[in-house]
Image (tube, helix red, strand yellow):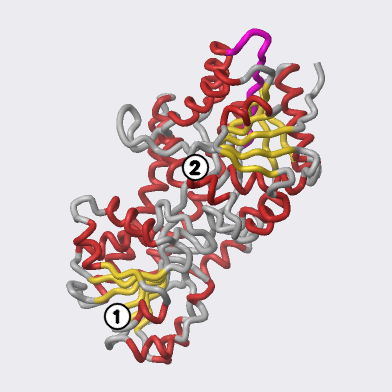
Amino acid sequence: MSPVKVQKIVCIGAGYVGGPTCAVIAQKCPDIVMTIVDLNEARINAWNDEEYRLPIYEPGLVDVVRSCRGRNLFFSTDVDKGIQEADLIFVSVNTPTKKSGVGAGFAADLNFIELATRRIAAVATSNKIVVEKSTVPCRTAESMRTILEANAKPNCRFDILSNPEFLAEGTAINDLHKPDRVLIGSLQTPEGLDACQSLSDVYAHWIPRQRILTVGLWSSELSKLAANAMLAQRISSINALSAICEATGANIDEVANAVGYDSRIGPKFLKASVGFGGSCFQKDILNLVYLSESLHLPGVATYWRQVVEMNEHQKSRFAKRVVDTLFNTITNKRITVLGFAFKADTGDTRESAAISLIRDFLKEKANVNLYDPQVEESQIWQDLAESSPNLTLETIKKQVKICSSSLEACKDAEAVVIATEWKEFKEIDWEMVYQGMNKPAFVFDGRLLVDAEKLTKIGFKVVTIGRGNL
């Protein structure tokens, strides 16, 4: 046995992970043919769009796709052909939190992982290296290996690897070009180590070998959940401290800066906000909670559950502060929400704080003006409908207006709520905004984005998360 030289890779799943990751691999490995397959024809058509109107927004992604699409990067709905021709298969499908059944609300739904695995076994006629790229519970690879071996054709062997992604939306391309580390987990058998070497050789086209970490299969799977849990824990910790700052008159920016100077702690992920969102943090922590409970570790489960509960508390606490500050009622008042994506430089709205805020404002009978520079209207209506199942979409549309600019959204409003840290919100003409608002005019900064003193001099009443009212 010796490591296979990878010449053709297929990625099953053309979403936020598979698309950017495999596009960068194609860019950095011109000797490897990369095909991304997905049964969603509309999504594949968007990846193949002549004007490069890609299905996801990520800074730098268009340039990467433009540099190699049609050369050694291809997008297709022909899943079977991709599987048959590939030496190595990335499985990068969605693993959402289960909505029903055992583990509902906590466990990962592995239906798409199993369907992809069974498809590989049914179609493959030669040896394949199969790589978990989706975020999965610990020991999912064992289930995949069992399915593949039970359904494999004669003389067809599958080697399973875990290669979790550590991308941050908004900086994903830079994260892929210059990663902190690449993690590859394998069985510690001669065949598993050879497969690990084959994938390592792919990444070594542009990543220094010392940054390619090779570990056991189960350690790799757990490391992804652990990394996201630790990052989310830091955010919830600083957000918990922000509530104390508001009550005591301390400044959360000053506290975070002082704490971050400690070399044992460091400054990253110590920025208070209205709460974290995205596809990973909450889902992965809940997955860790479920894993802990299934391993009969209730104390561990309780500890990690509190990270999510603190995040939800931060969102509801901020919404309540808006109501309390606006004289204890926002009924029929116009509230402007700037930002709907869960963070800047992405169009992703999953678990966005803005969704929770608007839901709470609608419960208080407020009218909401909303503006986000990237999120599609259809996505906004879908998210708002899901978050308020007791309201019809028609009712929601009577209370919510989607605007085409910040200035339009702020006109005739009682208050502006900053929910996403888009750079353009820093550059708003606040004097013009003030002139067009009802008085007293309030700004609620949920992202520590604006100059509170400057806005106060203009005439605004400014409420900043983690600070007492100016």
The answer to whether any part of residue 299 appears in the image is: no
The correct choice, above or below, for 355 with respect to 195 in the image is: below
> x and y percent of residue 247 in the render?
35, 69
Q: Does the magenta stretch include residue 162?
A: yes
Question: Crowding at label 2, few (<14), some or many (≥20) Cα neighbours within 10 Å?
Answer: few
Q: Mark 2 points at which residue?
A: 41
Label 1 element class: loop
Q: In which quarter of the image is residue 90?
A: top right
Instruction: Look at the image and give the residue range highlighted in magenta.
Output: 152-163
> Considering the image in quadrants, where does the N terminus appear?
top right
Residue 348 appears at what percent x and percent y?
Answer: 47, 55
> Which residue appears at 74% of the width and 39% of the height?
212
Instruction: Give the labeled residue for mark 1.
Output: 413
State which quarter of the image contains the C terminus.
bottom left
- Tell me the element at label 2: helix
Which residue: 30% across, 59% down? 316
Residue depicted at 73% across the width and 43% down the height: 72
**Residue kind at label 2, given as amino acid type:** Glu
Quarter holding residue 273: bottom left
* Image-based side of 293 in relation to 129, left or right: left
